[in-house]
Amino acid sequence: MSVRSGFNLTPIGYPVIRREVKKEDAVLISRVFMTNDTDNKGFLSRADLKVAVVELLGYKPTKYEADQMLRDYGDNVSETLRGLREEQFVACMSEKMAGLDEDDEIRHTFMAFDMHCRGFLTLDDVKKVEVDQDGDGRVSFRDFQFLMKYSLDDHI
């Protein structure tokens, strides 16, 4: 894809822009931990962790991914059970959140509209939505990003 289409592709796909995890994010992560620490046992089991990831990141991790998080960040909470304590969960989720592209959700939505993988949307693709900022009859990713982030009423 070209830069004209609004996508800056690397040879391996879209670049991931690492971001700083804000204080509010750390507070949210801790709150999610407390919500999912059933019975106040002081750690999240694999099942608890999977629910917490859904709540925090919006997707259900596979058993393999949950086990990988437990292996990388957790410790043995009993002879047969690994778990994540709050500080371990915060470290794990902070790393995951730092790797999130802030525009990733917008990009995925744009790609859902761009069913032909052209890097732009025609006005037929987004019926009744007027966001073609440059007037070329197509909605580029930049135009779509504008739609998702800002109210058109503020700029018309």
Image (cartoon, rainbow, N blue to C red):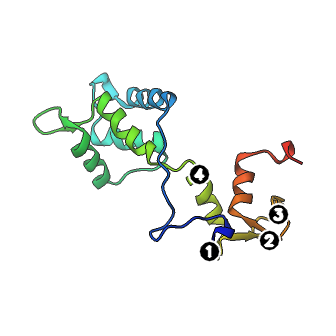
Instruction: Give neighbour class at mark 1: few <14, some 14-19, many 20+ (Cα, 10 Å).
Output: few
Query: Which residue bears the numbered disc 3?
Result: 134
Disc 2 or disc 4, which is closer to the eye? 4
Q: CA distance from mark 3 to mark 4?
A: 21 Å
Q: Residue at x 65, y 75 (%)?
A: 118
Q: Which residue is mark 4?
A: 103
Give the label on residue 64, or none: none
The CA distance from mark 1 to mark 2 is 15 Å
Describe the element under mark 1 as helix, strand or loop.
Answer: loop
Q: Nearer the viewer, mark 3 or mark 4?
A: 3
The amino acid type of the residue labelled 2 equals: Asp
Q: Nearer the viewer, mark 1 or mark 3?
A: 3
Dot placed on the residue nearer the N-terminal end, 2 or 3: 2
Other residues around mark 3 within 10 Å, as few (<14) / some (14–19) / many (≥20): few
Q: Is residue 80 above or below residue 105?
A: above
Q: Amino acid at mark 1?
A: Cys
